[in-house]
Amino acid sequence: MTSPVWAFQQALYSRLAAAFAPVEVFDHAPQNTAAPFVDIGDIDTRQDDLLAAASARRTAVTMVITAWGDPASKGQKTLHEMADTITAALHERQRDMPLAAGSLVSIRVTGSRVVTEADGIARSVLVMVSAYIQH
């Protein structure tokens, strides 16, 4: 049996890979990967069955997607564009993301944050996403 959360991650990966091509998308970027790239971060889940039908389960998912900008690109413009691309690919696009197990009830981009690493050079944008899966 396929995990509904894994099915969600696969659909999410497909949407991001299509939106960012040729920029690579990872669910765990290899160490020393050259930017730009997108990394699907840790996924938190909790059961939220109160609004589900009596015979179904509902899982709330929260996650952070990190987009790493090209270090040669000074400023934040590229990072904001990457966040906008993530938002366009995912925000309220549940109808465009069929799952192999369960169904995506909703998906929302809830915010973003630009971060400069301690080296003062590497920059990324963290994009927060929340979703509900019924299964």
Image (tube, rainbow, N blue to C red):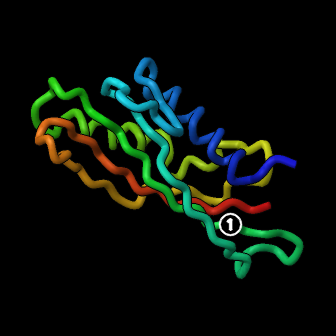
Residue bearing mark 1: 59
Front-most of 76 and 44? 44
Front-most of 25 and 107? 25
The quadrant the C terminus occupies is bottom right
State the residue lying farthest toward the bottom.
50
| Residue in view at x 61 percent, y 50 percent | 94
Q: Is residue 110 above or below residue 35?
A: below
Front-most of 93 and 126? 126
> How many badges with numbers are in the image?
1
User: Residue 131 placed where, x, y %?
Assistant: 57, 59
Disc 1 residue type (three-letter):
Thr
| Residue in view at x 56 percent, y 62 percent | 44
| Residue in view at x 71 percent, y 43 percent | 98
State the residue lying farthest toward the top.
22
| Residue in view at x 33 percent, y 43 percent | 83
Identify the image quadrant of residue 52. bottom right
The answer to whether 68 appears left or right of 54 in the picture is: left
State the residue lying farthest toward the front.
31
Q: Is residue 132 above or below residue 92?
A: below
The local secondary structure at tag 1 comes to strand
The answer to whether 121 appears left or right of 24 in the picture is: left
User: Residue 107 placed where, x, y %?
Assistant: 55, 56
User: Residue 72 placed where, x, y %?
Assistant: 15, 23
User: Residue 91 placed where, x, y %?
Assistant: 48, 50
Front-most of 72 and 110? 72
Q: Residues within 10 Å of mark 1 (few under 14, many from 20)?
A: many
